[in-house]
Image (spheres, grey):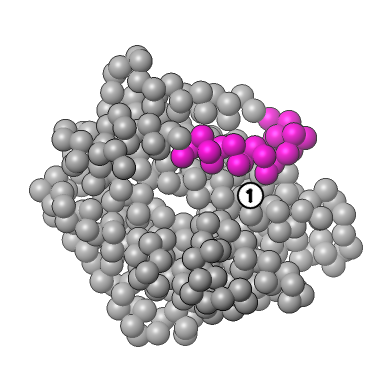
Amino acid sequence: MLSRTADHLFWMSRYTERAENTARMLDVNYQTSLLPQSAAAAQAGWMGMLSISELKQSYALKHGQHLQPRAVMDFMVRDENNPSSIISCLRAARENARAVRGTLTTEVWETQDQTYLEVARMLEQGALERDPAAFFEGVKFRSHLSRGVTVGTMLQDEALNFIRLGTFLERADNTARLVDVKFHAVESDFFGQGTEKDQELDFYHWSAILRSVSGFEIYRKVYRDVIKPERVAELLILRADMPRSLLGCMNEVMVNLGLVTSRVDSESRRRAGKLRADLQFARIDEILATGLHAFLTQFLDRVNELGSHISREFLVPS
């Protein structure tokens, strides 16, 4: 396969996944903002949302230092000058799909095209202002549809492998960012401190985080217990059977890297394998003892380095 074709497929899937994850993170922030909390806590939540995507400086340049929830949502959803906004990501995904139209099935191209047009129509009709939660669900649904059509209609060859590679690399990055910022938000209560009322609010906080990664029912099925922060961390980091966990994503990255290259000296496979092994044999108590933030920061650095090596080895170097 031509490296340019692989590059377009890889980034098509990354942008689609990024749009979905942005919708998920905005949704959890919107839901938690409805809980009783101080103005400072609400401000910290929206600041954390910008921190996840490394957009604090870009937001400040356009809207100033004062955070307004509606302005943050507009910036993250419909601002065409923000390359990480939902509408920008969906447009970029469609343009990458258009560039390799002949490689995709008709169903995949039409789904990508219709996804962008449908979300743009929803924004024009005021769906975000009328019901943010319903709008975010719509974005997630279109991403699910795109992924299902891709797996259900594409030939299982290198084209599909590069699409899957982009999806799971982007998902690992976004899950790590979500866990890092949201655990920081309730750091004081993480080790069992706080009043009974605080712990009650924490239940809704952790529930919202789990729902943002479609993990609430999975948590109940796996642990059959009250929601505990350390178990939420374990589920989202170390459970291989959790579709959006870091280990689950790295397992998929390794599988698809193995299918696109058989070279034993592949630096991308070596780095991915080492990162996967570190997760596979880790324990959550050890991670928490050494520092969750430090662990996730290192993970994000290693994922970004892995993405750079994949670009140099298989794609068009940026």
5 vs 206, nearest the viewer? 5
Where is residue 59? Give x, y as percent: 51, 69
Query: Is any atom of residue 140 visible in this view?
Result: no
Tell me where residue 49 sits by quadrant.
bottom right
State yes or no: residue 288 in magenta: yes
Tell me where residue 267 sits by quadrant.
top left
Dividing the image into 4 quarters, which one contains the N terminus?
A: top left
Q: Amino acid at mark 1?
A: Asp
98 vs 141, nearest the viewer? 98
Residue beneath the point at 66% across and 76% down:
34
Tell me which segment is drawn in magenta.
Answer: 283-304
State yes or no: residue 5 in magenta: no
**Magenta-colored segment: predominant secondary structure:** helix
Q: Is residue 92 left or right of residue 193?
A: left
Q: Is residue 199 left or right of residue 157?
A: right
Where is residue 265? Give x, y as percent: 35, 15
Query: Is any atom of residue 39 visible in this view?
Result: yes
Q: Is residue 292 left or right of residue 106?
A: right
Give the farthest residue toward the top: 264
The residue singled out by tag 1 in the image is: 180
61 vs 73, nearest the viewer? 61
Task: Using the image, determine if residue 51 lies above or below residue 67.
Answer: above
Residue beneath the point at 32% across and 58% down:
145
